[in-house]
Image: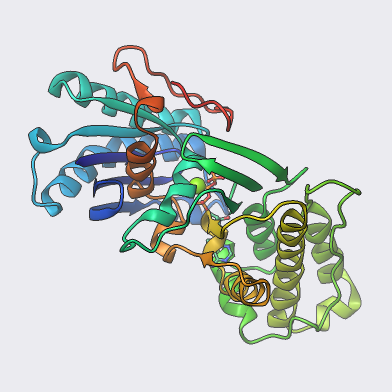
């Protein structure tokens, strides 16, 4: 079964063809970073217009690289939310037009479910078993998700303010690093000491798995503006900041496991590409004897293959009508039926 995936929720214009929800036949992603770097972040109006300019070519490219044709595609999967409305509507309108014109089934996918199913891509049978726990850390979200099955998932802990990726991007900006800041901090941190500066770690209320990252971000700002901070090594600041974020995430994950055992842990979302987080999670998994699944970096950040994978796993529960499917910038996590 071949699924064409389309993802335009933010600033990456992506299309992919995935076989049986696992094998990536092609994955095309046109990065818009160059357009947004000059503003220090994503400009929604520019992102939407760029999707209009780039999406048709991305779809044609994905189909050609998969050595197939639109006629041979079995279904079309598209991100319907959450995300930027001007970006989402471009993908949704294109997917609806294709599904209607080609009489193919259409699947309206929650972007965050896509991040979770990225873990199934390009794996030869070595996949997590249900129920597993996902640590989903991205530019807009940070949450712990209990995944009972492909269509039964619930958020059991979440950030009460900034997402981890947002904290990375904002702190990188304070350090004078280019956008997106997460990968830049990751690189710089390799030359610094994670113990150099003691940034605060958010402590959860008793019984809660929620997390907060705005305190770390503010502490970084005050430190950079202080006399000590002006003399400090930037790599030490980056490494110490990163260590604080990783500590909070691993602590909450451990607390979730104390409540209930899961078969395995899945790391997902753009921040899953962070090398310190990956290392800490692998160490935790070894210590706790829990299998850990981490997608390759290209499937951690936004991509259309993960959207096709989610459609293949969720099937009828997300099947949509090409004439009525609409983009929803605030699509709730638990809502499955389109
Ligand atoms: N190596 C890395 N270390 C830390 N953060 C990273 C790394 N690579 C990417 N990121 C961060 O990941 C985020 C982008 O992830 P993603 O594309 O999943 O987010 P998004 O799609 O904008 O948000 P959401 O999925 O919540 O809608 C950015 O904040 C970026 O800085
Ligand atoms: Mg994303």
Which of the pair 38/285 is nearer the observer?
Answer: 285
Counting labels gives: 0
Task: Specify whether 97 is left or right of 294.
Answer: left
Q: Residue at x 90, y 48 (%)?
A: 205
| Quarter of the picture holding the N terminus | top left
Placement of the C terminus among the 4 image quadrants: top left
Q: Is residue 206 above or below residue 275?
A: above
Residue 235 appears at what percent x and percent y?
68, 81
Res 190 seen here: yes
The answer to whether one can see residue 141 in this image is: no
The quarter holding residue 9 reads top left
Name the spot of residue 191 as percent of width and height, x first: 63, 87
Q: Is residue 61 above or below residue 92?
A: below
Q: How is the model colour-coded?
A: rainbow
Q: Residue at x 46, y 55 (%)?
A: 301
Extreme top residue here? 323
Compare residues 196 and 171 and report the one nearer the observer.
196
- Using the image, determine if residue 188 lies above or below residue 169: below
Q: Position of residue 139 (x, y in %)?
A: 58, 50
Tell whether 74 sits left or right of 296: left
Q: Residue at x 70, y 77 (%)?
A: 239
Q: Is residue 248 above or below residue 88?
A: below
């Amino acid at each position: 079964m071949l699924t064409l995936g389309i993802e335009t929720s933010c600033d990456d214009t992506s299309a992919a063809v995935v076989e049986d929800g696992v094998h990536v036949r092609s994955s095309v992603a046109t990065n818009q970073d160059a357009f947004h770097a000059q503003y220090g972040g994503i400009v929604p109006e520019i992102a939407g217009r760029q999707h209009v300019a780039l999406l048709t070519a991305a779809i044609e490219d994905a189909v050609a690289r998969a050595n197939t044709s639109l006629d041979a595609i079995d279904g079309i999967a598209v991100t319907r939310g959450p995300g930027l409305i001007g970006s989402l509507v471009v993908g949704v309108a294109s997917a609806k037009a294709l599904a209607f014109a080609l009489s193919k089934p259409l699947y309206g996918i929650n972007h965050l479910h896509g991040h979770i199913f990225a873990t199934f891509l390009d794996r030869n049978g070595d996949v997590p078993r249900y129920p597993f726990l996902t640590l989903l850390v991205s530019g807009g979200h940070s949450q712990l998700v209990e995944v009972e099955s492909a269509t039964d998932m619930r958020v059991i802990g979440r950030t009460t303010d900034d997402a981890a990726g947002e904290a990375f991007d904002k702190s990188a900006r304070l350090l004078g690093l280019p956008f997106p800041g997460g990968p830049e901090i990751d690189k710089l941190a390799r030359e610094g000491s994670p113990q150099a500066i003691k940034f605060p770690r958010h402590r959860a209320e008793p019984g809660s798995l929620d997390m907060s990252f705005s305190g770390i971000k503010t502490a970084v700002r005050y430190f950079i503006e202080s006399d000590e901070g002006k003399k400090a090594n930037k790599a030490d600041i980056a490494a110490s900041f990163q260590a604080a974020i990783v500590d909070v995430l691993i602590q909450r994950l451990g607390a979730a496991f104390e409540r209930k055992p899961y078969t395995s842990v899945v790391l997902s979302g753009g921040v899953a590409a962070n090398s310190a987080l990956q290392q800490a999670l692998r160490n935790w998994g070894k210590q706790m004897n829990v299998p850990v699944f981490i997608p390759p970096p290209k499937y951690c950040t936004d991509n259309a293959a993960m959207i096709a994978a989610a459609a293949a796993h969720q099937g009828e529960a997300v099947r949509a009508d090409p004439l009525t499917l609409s983009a929803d910038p605030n699509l709730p996590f638990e809502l499955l039926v389109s």
